[in-house]
Image (cartoon, rainbow, N blue to C red):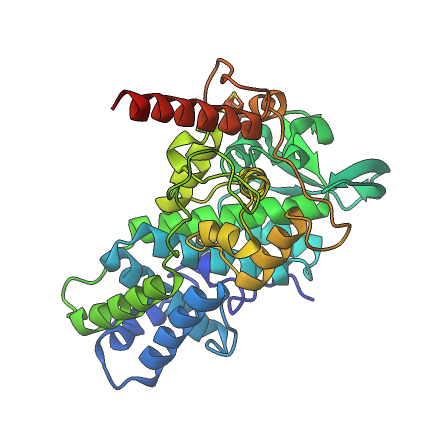
């Protein structure tokens, strides 16, 4: 382990000043159809779309890794598909996160600072404090050191998007001193991963593909890779209401009518359909809600296939766990409305009719729907 940044692993932290020559070479990757580098760049992109990770086989040294990264920014900017941009940013940030867990504290902070954070690292022997950790019904106590720090505003900005609903990142879990938040190593790495993701999204937005270079053939190739990826992940048709005359299906479970979902669940479904990236807590609650309606693991997984960080193996394991098909065989319920409101997932201020949790509200909506439909059919 060293305190020099390894740009093979973290190419997004390199600047033109670090590798001035590479930016002159970049157009050659983009233009030449016979270039071996170009073929490897396209393979890397396929790997990102299919597997959600950057394969280190595709980039063997720092120069190449940085060259690929900056060429990819131009390509992504030209394609202009935010879902693909998000998947690429997630792949880089997740892959980087694996390496970060092996790095010294000084390197983590050096990288964070190079990426624009005002991070600090206390090397003195900081007190270790017991911390209660909980997740999926398990609670444990761990001794942790709070050696890493960030200004409060940077910390809040970083956790305010995808980590907002996860209580792990609540300020009450950390020390605040002199305008800075002190966090443990694993939290710092997770926050840094989030910052890397945001940085890459910004890099794509700011990319300026060279105007004098005609790389339309590369763009076409990338478009074809992207459209094959979309064909592959296209969600299967959802179970629909069919001929049912009641909310309950003969074989058990409830009829599925997404329009009747309560606003909290509709919001997550909508985000998933439009390429959004709901938080883990939102995904957990939607999976639990769909499982309680009676959907099987495959049908629940179909809802998540379009997420930028979708990984079939991991998602299936998690969904099967939530549906009670693994481990302790406990089938989880979505949180109650009170909790969903307290963590900012409920999008309305009032309470939905029909109950105090999304499942009860959905059942109520279904009953009302079938009652109304029965009355209309009678009148007709
Ligand atoms: S009140 Fe409950 S069911 Fe309705 S949107 Fe809010 S959390 Fe969902």
The number of discs equals 0
Q: In this view, does 303 lie to the left or right of 108?
A: left
Work out whether residue 146 can be spotted.
no
- Vertical arrangement, residue 214 with respect to residue 328, above or below: below
- Vertical arrangement, residue 105 with respect to residue 177, above or below: below
Q: Is residue 230 left or right of residue 116?
A: left
Q: Position of residue 324 (x, y in %)?
A: 69, 49
Quarter of the image that includes the N terminus = bottom right
Which one is nearer the viewer's eye here, 281 or 358? 358
Place residue 144 in its image quadrant.
top right
- Vertical arrangement, residue 307 with respect to residue 130, above or below: below
Q: Residue farthest to the top? A: 350
Q: Which residue is drawn at 58% across and 23% down?
A: 337
Q: Residue at x 75, y 54 (%)?
A: 327
Place residue 74 in its image quadrant.
bottom left
Work out whether residue 182 can be spotted.
yes
Q: In this view, does 111 lie to the left or right of 72?
A: right
Which one is nearer the viewer's eye here, 341 or 211? 341
Q: Where is residue 233 in the image (x, y as percent from the top left)?
A: 39, 61
Q: Position of residue 209 (x, y in %)?
A: 23, 60
Which one is nearer the viewer's eye here, 99 or 246? 246
Q: Residue at x 50, y 23 (%)?
A: 364
Which one is nearer the viewer's eye here, 40 or 192? 40
Quarter of the image that includes the C terminus = top left
Q: Where is residue 165 in the image (x, y as percent from the top left)?
A: 58, 33
């Amino acid at each position: 382990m060293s305190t020099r940044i390894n740009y093979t692993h973290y190419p997004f932290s390199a600047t033109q000043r670090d590798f001035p020559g590479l930016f002159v070479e970049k157009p050659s990757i983009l233009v030449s159809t016979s270039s071996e580098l170009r073929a490897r760049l396209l393979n890397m992109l396929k790997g990102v779309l299919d597997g959600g990770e950057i394969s280190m086989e595709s980039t063997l040294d720092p120069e190449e890794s940085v060259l690929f990264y900056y060429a990819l920014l131009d390509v992504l900017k030209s394609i202009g598909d935010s879902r693909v941009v998000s998947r690429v940013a997630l792949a880089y940030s997740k892959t980087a996160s694996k390496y970060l867990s092996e790095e010294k504290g000084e390197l983590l902070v050096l990288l964070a600072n190079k990426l624009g954070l005002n991070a600090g690292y206390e090397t003195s022997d900081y007190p270790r404090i017991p911390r209660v950790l909980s997740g999926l019904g398990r609670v444990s106590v761990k001794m942790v050191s709070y050696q890493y720090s960030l200004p409060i505003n940077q910390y809040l900005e970083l956790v305010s998007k995808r980590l907002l609903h996860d209580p792990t990142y609540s300020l009450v879990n950390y020390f605040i001193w002199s305008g800075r938040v002190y966090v443990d190593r694993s939290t710092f790495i997770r926050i840094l991963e989030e910052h890397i993701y945001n940085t890459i999204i910004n890099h794509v937005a700011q990319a300026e593909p060279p105007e004098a270079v005609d790389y339309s053939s590369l763009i076409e190739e990338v478009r074809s890779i992207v459209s094959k990826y979309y064909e592959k992940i296209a969600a299967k048709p959802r179970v629909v209401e069919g001929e049912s005359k009641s909310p309950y299906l003969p074989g058990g479970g409830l009829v599925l009518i997404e329009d009747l979902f309560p606003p909290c669940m509709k919001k997550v479904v909508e985000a998933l359909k439009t390429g959004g990236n709901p938080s883990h807590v939102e995904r957990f609650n939607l999976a639990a809600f769909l499982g309680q309606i009676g959907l099987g693991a495959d049908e629940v997984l179909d809802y998540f296939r379009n997420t930028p960080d979708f990984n079939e193996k991991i998602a299936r394991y998690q969904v099967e766990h939530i549906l009670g098909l693994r481990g302790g065989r406990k089938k989880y319920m979505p949180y109650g409305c009170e909790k969903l409101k307290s963590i900012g997932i409920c999008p309305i201020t009032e309470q939905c009719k029909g109950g105090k949790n999304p499942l009860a509200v959905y059942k109520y909506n279904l009953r009302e729907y079938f009652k109304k439909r029965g009355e209309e059919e009678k009148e007709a």
